[in-house]
Amino acid sequence: MNKSFNDIEDKIYLFLDEIEKLPDWENRVKIYYDLYPNIKFIITGSVSISLRKGSNESLAGRLFSYFLPPLTFGEYLELNNLKLDGIINNIDLYKNKIIPLFYKYIKYGTFPELLFNNDDEFAREYIFGTVIDRIIYKDISDEFHVNDTNLLKILLKTVIERPGMILNFKSLSENYGRDQRTISNYFEYLQFGLLTKIVYNYRPNEVISMRKLKKCYLSTPNLIFAMSANFDEKLPYILENLVLMHTNCNYFYKNNFEVDFILKKDSKIIPIEVKKSYKSIKQINNFLKHYSDKVMHSLMITLNDESISENIKIIPVYKFLLLEEYKYD
């Protein structure tokens, strides 16, 4: 690269993939970025931790980060030749096509590489080896100098067995014989490695929310399929995790009662309960007694049930996952 680049008036785009494998890549990019204003870098990589950590530390103020999330259910249907424009207003007419794809989606459909796969064992091996093991034993281990990768895997397995678990670091410390600070740090590493997501106990004051109880979910329920021997028995947890993934919600509510998710929309909130089948709406009604002035409307997400009960919308999960208005808080 030489100064003749400055003589070119048009922008020049350089695409650099897997750049994190180069030593000191951040500072090299920084030099060229500052020297040649007409050059724009598009940097991608599979080792997400290295890429984000390096860019945040050395390229602050010089970059825009874009996180490519797992495939949404809508994207998955589109890639399976079910165009949303044609079905969104007539979902019931396409139910026989949508439902089989839904059950495939919750197993391994959030990974584009497995789009046309029909082999469950191959999907498990792919997710386990290419995603989970690589992130734990390579990405997290290298970037955070983790000494006990076995503990990291045990903690992930704990979340897989019960997505939405309350994070009780004292109890986990006693169960696994490790320091509470180590347990807390390892959960932060799992989240930074995009394997898990932590949500907070909702309070109108966000600072107070951050100090309250925390729950831990998976970045995609496909991890359950890869690491759990009783996947089918975990359907209620899977539904809950699907709703979290679709909304990217940051809050739940727990005081004397519990509501699965509190979705913030501008100055309003939407309480969401997730159940395998329609049951009592007592939890949401309790919540409304405290926060009715803030609530936009309320939702209950189920496997198949659909109706409206006392101003609460009850929506099957496969329909909810196609509703853009609840996508990505």
Image (cartoon, helix red, strand yellow):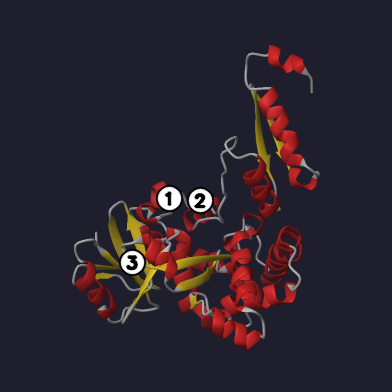
Asked whether 228 or 114 is in front, the reply is 228
Tell me whether circle 2 and circle 1 mark residues in contact (CB < 8 Å).
yes
Sequence-first disc among 2 and 1: 2
- CA gap, disc 3 and disc 1: 36 Å
Which SS class for mark 3? loop
| Left or right side of 226 for 138 | right
Q: Residue sitting at 63 percent across and 64 percent down?
A: 189
Q: As drawn, which residue projects farthest toward the bottom?
A: 175
Amino acid under disc 2 = Glu
Amino acid under disc 1 = Leu
Residue 61 placement (x, y as % from top left): 57, 36
Which SS class for mark 1? helix
Residue 212 placement (x, y as % from top left): 42, 72
Amino acid under disc 3 = Arg
Which SS class for mark 2? helix
Residue 178 placement (x, y as % from top left): 66, 81
Q: Residue sitting at 66 percent across and 52 percent down?
A: 48
The residue at which mark 2 appears reads as 78
Location of the C terminus by quadrant is bottom left
The residue at which mark 1 appears reads as 84
- CA gap, disc 2 and disc 1: 7 Å
| Left or right side of 72 for 274 | left
| Left or right side of 27 for 209 | left
Sequence-first disc among 3 and 1: 1
Question: Would you say residue 57 is visible in this rendering?
Answer: yes
Picture quadrant where residue 44 is located: top right
The residue at which mark 3 appears reads as 203
Sequence-first disc among 2 and 3: 2
Say few, some or many: other residues with alpha carbon within 10 Å of mark 3 (under 14 / 14 to 19 / 20 or more). Answer: some
Q: As drawn, which residue projects farthest toward the top?
A: 7
Asked whether 65 or 228 is in front, the reply is 65
Question: Would you say residue 13 is visible in this rendering?
Answer: no
